[in-house]
C-alpha cells in the first residue's frame, strides 16, 4: 500500500497544508500520516524537520515545499 509520511512539528504546519492541498488537487486517495515521533526520526536518520517520506523513501527534509513542488513529487512517486 502506498503511504505518505510527514515528520513534522508545529513549526512546519504549512508543509502539511501544502501536502494536503497537493493530494486533493491530484485527486489521489493516499492517507497522510503526520507525526513528531522521535523514534521514526531516528529510524529514517533525520533530525531536521519537516521530513517527507513516500513509500518508505526519504524524499525531502529541512524545507517547507510549495504545493506545486509537492504535486511534482507526488506525480513522480505515486502516479
Image (tube, rainbow, N blue to C red):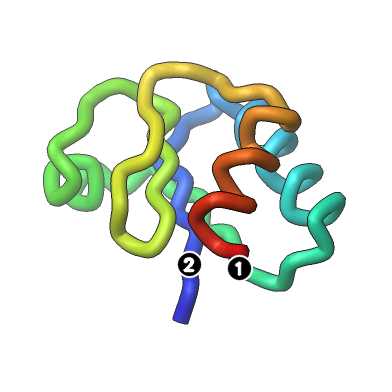
Badge 1 marks a residue whose secondary structure is loop
Position of 17 relative to 77 (above/below): above
Circle 1 residues within 10 Å: few <14, some 14–19, many ≥20: few
Please say if 8 is above or below 65: below
Task: Give the residue displayed 55% in from the left and 62% down from the top.
Answer: 78
Q: CA distance from mark 2 to mark 1?
A: 6 Å
- The quadrant in which residue 10 appears is top right
Quarter of the image with the N terminus in it: bottom left
The answer to whether mark 2 and mark 1 are in CB contact below 8 A is yes
Secondary element at tag 2: loop
Name the residue tied to disc 2. 3
Looking at marks 2 and 1 on the same chain, the residue that comes earlier in the sequence is marked by 2
Percent of width and height locating residue 20: 73, 48
Q: Which image quadrant for residue 46?
A: top left
- Quadrant location of the C terminus? bottom right
* Residue position for label 1: 31
Residue at figure coordinates x 54%, y 50% from the top left? 76
Give the residue drawn at x 56%, y 42%: 73
**Side of 79 relative to 43 (left or right):** right
Residue for point 74% across, 30% down: 68
Q: Which mark is residue 4?
A: none
Query: Residue 22: x and y, percent?
Result: 75, 44
Q: Nearer the viewer, residue 5 or 23?
A: 23
Give the left or right position of residue 65, taking residue 20 as reference: left
Q: How many marks?
A: 2
- Is 49 placed above or below 4 here? above
Amino acid at each position: 500500500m502506498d503511504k505518505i509520511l510527514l515528520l513534522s512539528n508545529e513549526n512546519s504546519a504549512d508543509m502539511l497544508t501544502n501536502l494536503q492541498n497537493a493530494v486533493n488537487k491530484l485527486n489521489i486517495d493516499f492517507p497522510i500520516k503526520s507525526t513528531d515521533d522521535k523514534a521514526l526520526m531516528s529510524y529514517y536518520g533525520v533530525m531536521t524537520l519537516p521530513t517527507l517520506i513516500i513509500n518508505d523513501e526519504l524524499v525531502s527534509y529541512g524545507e517547507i515545499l510549495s504545493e506545486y513542488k509537492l504535486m511534482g513529487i507526488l506525480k513522480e512517486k505515486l502516479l
